[in-house]
Image (cartoon, grey):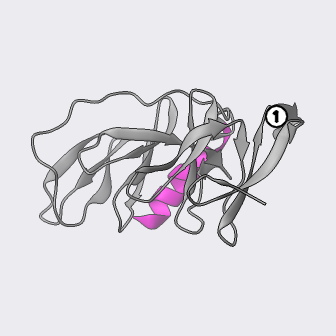
């Protein structure tokens, strides 16, 4: 199954590259009555992906263009018509992770970046927002700190983007400025 997901991910490469830093906002989804317990595995049906429980019962109907495994601590990254999303075990979209390296941002030191209303913040593997989206750009955490900026702009540079200007400073894992 992993090789199928890898192949499917490669076919989406061109589409994923088009996702901008200020991607669409989370969309409220209707919630099923119960939350699935136990592990959930992604499966494909036609061109769409969903999730099954250990007994093979469909828990989240296939509606995603791609689905990655659920993190041991909670959520899973999926790809839909609006780009990458992070969902809970009910299939509810919790937030939109920052698209990085043709996929959702990587967790570093237990946090990954997300985008809301054109700003960036950080969330944990359970899909809980740890640092609100308040920055125009944010780098991953390293050694308990991350560089963020206010007032910077993303500039297209060929097929890549770069960040220019603004005021840069360092924050800790609570979002407080450090020296």
Q: Quadrant of residue 116?
A: top right
Please tell me whether residue 5 belongs to the stretch shown in magenta: yes
Pick whichever, 56 or 131, lies toward us. 131
Q: Position of residue 108 (x, y in %)?
A: 60, 66
**Could you tell me residue 23's position as x and y percent?**
59, 30
> Which residue is depicted at the point 56% across and 57% down?
174
| Residue 64 in sight from this viewpoint | no
Please tell me which residue is depicted at 40% across the width and 51% down the height of the picture: 127
- Tell which of 132 and 157 is nearer to you: 132
Q: Is residue 67 left or right of residue 92?
A: right
- Residue 105 locus on image (x, y percent): 59, 53
Horizontally, is 143 left or right of 8 in the view?
right
* Mark 1 surroundings within 10 Å by alpha-carbon count, few (fewer than 14), some (14 through 19), many (20 or more): some
Report the span colored magenta.
1-14
Taking the magenta stretch, the answer to whether it contains residue 77 is no
Name the image quarter holding the C terminus. Answer: bottom right
Identify the main secondary structure in magenta.
helix
Residue 105 against residue 27 in the figure, above or below: below
In this picture, residue 46 sits left or right of residue 162: left
- For the N terminus, which image quadrant? bottom left
Please tell me which residue is depicted at 68% across the width and 53% down the height of the picture. Answer: 101
Question: Tag 1, which secondary structure?
Answer: loop
Residue 54 in the image: state x and y as whole percent. Answer: 17, 66
Question: Measuring 43% from the left and 31% from the top, which residue is drawn there?
Answer: 26
Q: Taking 26 as reference, is 148 above or below it?
A: below
Check disc 1 and report the residue beneath it: 152
- On the question of residue 124 being in view, the answer is yes
161 is higher (above) or lower (below) than 27 = below
30 lies left or right of 140 = left
């Amino acid at each position: 199954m992993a090789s199928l997901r890898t192949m499917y991910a490669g076919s989406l490469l061109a589409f994923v590259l088009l996702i901008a830093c200020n991607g669409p906002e989370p969309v409220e989804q209707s919630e099923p009555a119960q939350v699935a317990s136990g592990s959930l595995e992604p499966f494909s049906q036609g061109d769409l992906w969903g999730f099954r429980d250990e007994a093979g019962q469909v828990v989240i109907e296939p509606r995603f263009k791609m689905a990655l495994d659920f993190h041991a601590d909670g959520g899973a990254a999926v790809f839909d018509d609006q780009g990458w999303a992070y969902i809970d075990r009910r299939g509810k979209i919790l937030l939109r992770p920052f698209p990085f390296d043709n996929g959702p941002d990587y967790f570093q030191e237990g946090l990954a970046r997300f985008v809301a209303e054109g700003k960036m913040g950080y969330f944990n593997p359970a899909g809980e927002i740890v640092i609100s989206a308040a920055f125009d750009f944010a780098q991953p955490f390293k050694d308990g700190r991350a560089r963020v900026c206010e007032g910077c702009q993303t500039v297209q540079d060929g097929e890549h983007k770069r960040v220019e200007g603004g005021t840069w400073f360092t924050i800790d894992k609570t979002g407080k400025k450090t020296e």
